Image (spheres, helix red, strand yellow):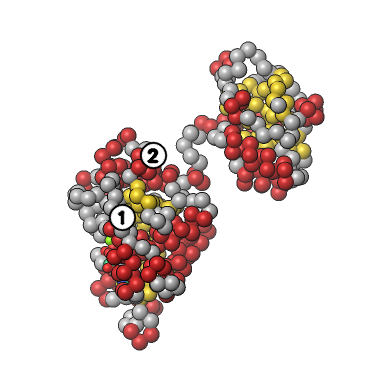
Amino acid sequence: MMEFRRGKTGSLKGSARGRDAVAVLLSEAELAAAEVPSGPLAGFEARLVALSPEATPDAATLGWARAIVIETDGKTPEGWERLTNAIRALSPLPVIAALREPTHGETRQCMHLGAVDVIALPLGLDELQQALGQARQRMSAGAAPSEDSHGRVIAFVKSVGGVGATALATQMGCLLAAREGVAGRETCLLDLDLQFGNAALYLGLSPTLSVADVIAAGARADGALLRSTTTEHPSGLHVVAAPPDIIPLESVSAEQMSDILDLARQEFSNVLVDLPGSWTNWSLSLVARADAVCLITEMSIPSLRQARRQLDMLASQDLGDLPIYVIVNRHERGFLKSIKTDEAEQALNHSIAATISNDFRTLSAAIDQGVPVSDIKMKTRLEKDMSAMIDMLLTHIEQRE
Ligand SMILES: Nc1ncnc2c1ncn2[C@@H]1O[C@H](COP(=O)(O)OP(=O)(O)O)[C@@H](O)[C@H]1O
Ligand SMILES: [Mg+2]
């Protein structure tokens, strides 16, 4: 049971006298030991509320609070479970955990569980004021989701058309979606190859809506609208298809496309982007924001030459220090191999990050049926290569984060 102790003045609406209220949930013992606030703290009106250490706070009865301080027992599993449940039940309110003699490990655990701050018990007003100041800063940083909740972006560009950018983006998308799905994270493939996009086709999907609908919605577009344009592949990959009709690349602005990428990042943990073969202002601004740019090429003189030109162009736009990964697709081993890796790297003046085996039979059957390659044949080298490429990209992205 919850019961008000002090500071319960007049109306229980959140901003009595224009001030935000913070609920300080303490056990009887801690209430007795607490310093009692006599005035506002960091612009908050603090109200002490008695709550037994076993009870999970009830969000409905705390509707007036803009922030919560909750007593936490960091010494028992039950204590951690209660904090976890409280943070979940009270989301999105900022929750400050209050512990007796919190250790570094316990403080880290609180933050890990989603607490915005940790203070020591018995409750002291100076420390509470400081924590509330920080909570306020977070609140005014916006209702916008925090930086960490933003999905990572992996962009696919190609040296020349037909090197397999879409084949890799779709197949890797399926692999990544299945893998991340286990951890409850979603993956989306944005087909921004506005004129020749065929990602949905490669996945056997026939969506009724496309990215054209998101573009058309303009400023009205939000996360829900973006989601409504996605089609889910059985692998769990959410696909935003390219427009059904060819639209001029220059008919969209960098700002529009950047907004669409933001929505996708807000909704999905992983966002793969298939980009057009020719550069535009907006595609350059999108790659500039990617966590990884995969430049797909083949191990042939013409394809490597075009890959080099793409790298040079990016460098000339001051984008040379982007995390660019050159991926050699349709790679042959052994005697079929015509160009050596070090020769190719020299020609590119860039390292090769990964190679993907040539396996036309498996891949074209997968594309014809709109399924992951593993549905056609288990344990192919092709699948192993793609899986290794995902590992490599995720490791690099995490290291940079
Ligand atoms: N690793 C590979 N082995 C064999 N064939 C491949 C491989 N990757 C792509 N292909 C084939 O190349 C063709 C073109 O691929 P696509 O992804 O459409 O190219 P892009 O999007 O770069 O223009 C597809 O028919 C696909 O089956
Ligand atoms: Mg393509």
Q: Nearer the viewer, residue 49 or 349?
A: 49
Q: Which residue is mark 2?
A: 224
Q: Residue 205 bears which disc, if any?
A: 1
* Label 2 C-beta lies within 8 Å of the nearest ligand 2 atom: no
Residue 258, position as x, y percentages in the image? 34, 45
- Residue 113, above or below 1: below
Depth check, mark 2 against mark 1: the one in front is 1
Q: Earlier in the sequence, mark 2 or mark 1?
A: 1
SS type, badge 2 = helix
- Of residue 41 and residue 261, the one placed in the foreground of this image is 261
Characterize the local packing of mark 2: few (<14), some (14-19) or many (20 or more) Cα atoms within 10 angstroms. Answer: few
For the point 34% across and 75% down, the residue is 358
Q: How many marks?
A: 2
Q: Residue 337: x and y, percent?
A: 34, 82
Neighbor class of circle 1 (other Cα within 10 Å; few <14, some 14-19, many 20+) is: some
Say which of 382 and 274 sits in front.
382
Q: Please, what is the three-letter code of the amino acid marked with disc 2?
A: Ala
* Residue 137 as seen in the image, left or right of residue 9: left
